Each structure stands twice: as C-alpha cells, then as structure tokens.
Image: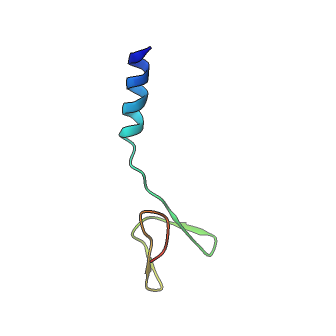
Amino acid sequence: MNKIAVIICLSFASVTVSADCLYNGYLYPTGAVIGGLTCQADGTWG
C-alpha cells in the first residue's frame, strides 16, 4: 500500500503546473503577450 502512495505522490510532483490565461474567449499559454499584457504563471494578465 505504501508503494502505491509513493508512486502517486511522485507522479503528481513531476507534473509542471502551468495556468493558461483567458482573453476574449481564447486560452493563451504562460508568457503570451497581447496588447501589452503578459500571461502570468498564475493565470492572470499583467
């Protein structure tokens, strides 16, 4: 049972979290620049 828990934890730890940003109904990846705004890693424009 512990081996399964360790495998599950490691699989979640290896996933890179990246939030997309919504702009006019379209999703843009982190780092996209539109109209002087940059899509931030937390999903906001700044």
Q: Out of 42 and 23, give the one closest to the viewer.
A: 42
Q: Position of residue 30 (x, y in %)?
A: 42, 65
Q: Position of residue 15 (x, y in %)?
A: 40, 43
> Going by the picture, which residue comes out furthest to the right?
25
What colour scheme does the image use? rainbow
> Going by the picture, which residue comes out furthest to the top?
1
Q: Is the N terminus in the top left, top right, bottom left or bottom right quadrant?
A: top left
Q: Position of residue 13 (x, y in %)?
A: 37, 39
Q: Out of 2 and 38, give the one closest to the viewer.
A: 2
Instruction: Name the residue located 38 percent from the left edge and 48 percent from the top edge.
Output: 16
Instruction: Name the residue located 43 percent from the left edge and 56 percent from the top edge.
Output: 18
Instruction: Name the residue located 49 percent from the left edge and 70 percent from the top edge.
Output: 44
Rendered position, 25 above or below 10:
below
> Going by the picture, which residue comes out furthest to the bottom?
35
Instruction: Name the residue located 43 percent from the left edge and 85 percent from the top edge.
Output: 36
Left or right of 7, for residue 23: right
- Count of all numbered marks drawn on residues in the image: 0
Q: Position of residue 3 (x, y in %)?
A: 38, 17
Rendered position, 31 above or below 3:
below
Q: Is the C terminus in the top left, top right, bottom left or bottom right quadrant?
A: bottom left
